[in-house]
Image (cartoon, helix red, strand yellow):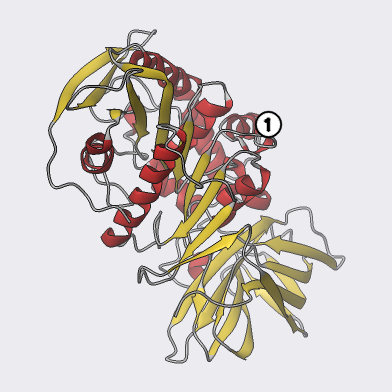
Amino acid sequence: MVAPHKAADFAKLDTTVKMDDGVPIAVTYYTPSGTPPATGWPAVMMLHGLGQTRNSFDISNWSANRVAETYLVPNGYAVLTFDARAHGQSGGLFSLDGPRELQDTINLFHWLMSRPNIDANRIGAFGVSYGGGMVWLATVYGVPFAAIAVAATWTDLREALEPQGLVRSGVIVGFSQSIPQSRYDPTLAGLLQEMLSEHDTPALRTFLAARSVRPQLRGFNIPTLLLQGRRDFAFDADQALSAFKLLTGPKRLYFGNLGHAPAANPPDELQYYAGEVLHWFDRFVKRVPSTLGSRPNVLLAADPWTRKVKSFVGIPPTRSLRFTFNGSATLTAAGKVVRTTASVPHIETFGAPTVRLRISTRTQYRHLVVVLTAVRPDGSELVVTDGGAATSTLGSKVRTITLRLPDEITSIPRGSRLRLTFAATSTVQSIANLVYLNSVPDASTALIGRVTLTLPVLRKPVSP
């Protein structure tokens, strides 16, 4: 853990940089006090989250400028922060990490590289959520960062927003409200309506694929630090875990209590993982000799945050629990079918749960949502994860389908009962569960038969 600096002597420049299309991008440029190294200052670019600015505090209780001033600049880094296109004081239109935003990042990298007393070979990048998605894209498409750190972000945007062909409409609506509609690129506005209407068009698939990097990560060898939320219902743990498995260069993965809702984002934890970022850049941007990155470590913080962090070499060992429910029940458009297990010991999930079920529908029940919860001994219900799939091609013949649920690393207390709720929307399980909002026609019915839940859990929980 690195103690934050209370104050530091540095130069700070707030200005604008004109992009190659004439749009001004608002930036803050920091340089440390003192004499630069012979080769110039090592540097870091910092990219903020969706709807934020370089000065605003986002989901992780940080702003780019605050982290720069507290952790990076006092430790000998020049830092460039900026308001992304269509954010804050910057001009232009928003297209969700599209080609124009990518070109902005390239332009700003070259602007930073050309500053006096900057070591052009020692520039890193740190991005959160939307900014993390751009750090991935820029690196994959050739920006020569010495090392990167990405937090609470995606590697496969379609899997995050439209898994198994079913739109996570509540997540999309929430994100879409982060940017005023007047600042949307017209193409994005049209695609947003297609997605919310459950129209899985080739244009939409192309749009999401162009903003995803997972297919390009096999053999990727840029030193990469991944910081991901244990329980982030926008970008689940597998968004980082899948990337970690593919990377061949130095890599390190931290799972903590950060990220989008329902992540707790305790301020004290920021100090811990800010230290992880600083040490990573010290090793691979400053090139300070150390053993960091010599082993592919996975770090897993306890939930709630207690400063207890368990380190594993590689993926933590798991085992699978399997629960089977027999019998059948009819699911209506506004109704639900519920299956509940007996009580379980203290377990901690790790990995994507799967639900395999027998289903038929005479009325083309067009999609199915399943919510996995834990009913605690006191009767309160904890949402573990939820998923679903498009089912419009099903018919009256009974078929077996498999639903793969997002990987939300969840500590489930002893004596809890696991519950599966099948419905057309997640709000049927709880009015506060706003992930899947699209309904099915009123006359829709489906017959739910035998159900099997397979739940990967840690061999030994790390949380109390």
Label 1 neighbour load within 10 Å: few <14, some 14-19, many 20+: few
Whole-percent x, y for residue 370 in the image: 61, 68
Whole-percent x, y for residue 281 in the image: 41, 38
Question: Who is closer to the viewer here, 68 or 103?
Answer: 68
On screen, 12 above or below 338? above
Residue shown at 35% from the left, 26% from the top: 42
Residue shown at 51% from the left, 37% from the top: 193
Q: Which residue is mark 1?
A: 202
Residue shown at 17% from the left, 22% from the top: 13
Whole-percent x, y for residue 47 in the image: 36, 34
On screen, 464 above or below 280? below
Q: Amino acid at mark 1?
A: Pro
On screen, 43 above or below 104? below
Instruction: For residue 232, say whether it is visible.
Output: no
On screen, 169 above or below 21? below
Q: Count the labels in the image.
A: 1
Residue shown at 23% from the left, 16% from the top: 16
